[in-house]
Each structure stands twice: as structure tokens, then as C-alpha cells.
Image: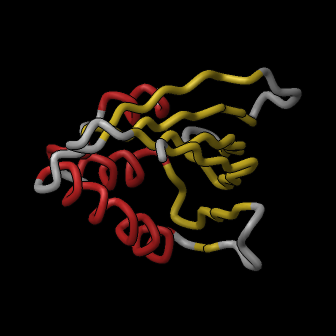
Amino acid sequence: MLNTAIIQAEISEGFEGYLEIFGKFYADDVQVSSETQHEPIRGKARVTSFLLSFLVPLHVLAEVGGLTMSIKESTISGDAANEIHSAWTLNIVGASGKTCTLNWRTLRKWKGSRVCTSTTMTYSEVADR
């Protein structure tokens, strides 16, 4: 349900939908990290600030700059019942037709109906030159 909600949200219509998804599915004491971060981000308020730091610019670029974006997800089998592994692809197309594709993998650990830990791994970017 979480991944479906992310895919169905439209950044060009606003970033608020993504914040609602985050509020609904993530624990108050969530811990978010990536391979490139020295320290994880802990707590819903701090993670919300982090999310806003890239959701707002993406929304502005989509609404004002004419970028179109599409996101795809595929689930990767995991060993533990409370973990979900996903591969993500974000395709961004500029008004000029040039594209940029971002790929990453996410591991989410769940406690009940809420994500308590989310880790992003193996990020890559491919852009038209």
C-alpha cells in the first residue's frame, strides 16, 4: 500500500500528498539513512524537513519548469517478514526533451503498520548529454 501510494501521488499537483503518505505510514521515531550519510536522520519532524528539502524544488520544477516525472517500483524478495526491499526508478523529462533517470534501492523495516527504519542504497543517475 505504501509503494502504491507513492507511485500514484503527482508531484506536479503538490508535495503535500507525499507528506500525508509519510505521516500515515511512518513511525514517530522513524530512522532514515543512506549509504552516503554519516548519521541517520531520526524522528518524524527531522525527516519531514529533509523530505521538504527536495520535494519542494521537484514540485516547483514540475509545475513552473515544465518537467514531467514518472516513478516505478519493483519489490525485491527479502528474508524477514517485517522487511520490504524495493527497487525504484524516477524518470525526469525536461521541456527540451532531455531526460534524467535516477535509480535506487530501499530497505524498509516495519513495526506493526508503520515503517520504523528506511535505508536507501545503490543510488545511480543517468542523464542525456
Asked if residue 99 is positioned above or below residue 46 in the image, the reply reads above
Q: Residue at x 41, y 52 (%)?
A: 22
Where in the figure is residue 128, as x and y percent of width and height? 47, 42
Horizontal side, residue 64 vs residue 1: left or right = left
Where in the figure is residue 31, as x and y percent of width and height? 65, 65
Asked which quadrant contains residue 85, the reply is top right
Horizontal side, residue 34 vs residue 56: left or right = right
Q: Residue at x 49, y 69 (%)?
A: 47
Asked which quadrant contains residue 29, the reply is bottom right
Residue most toward the right? 79
Q: Residue at x 35, y 40 (%)?
A: 98
Residue most toward the front? 129
Where in the figure is residue 116, as x and y percent of width and height? 64, 54
Q: Nearer the viewer, residue 72 or 77?
A: 72
Asked if residue 24 is positioned above or below residue 58 in the image, the reply reads above
Asked if residue 2 is positioned above or below residue 53 in the image, the reply reads above
Q: Nearer the viewer, residue 68 or 88?
A: 68
Q: Residue at x 70, y 54 (%)?
A: 119
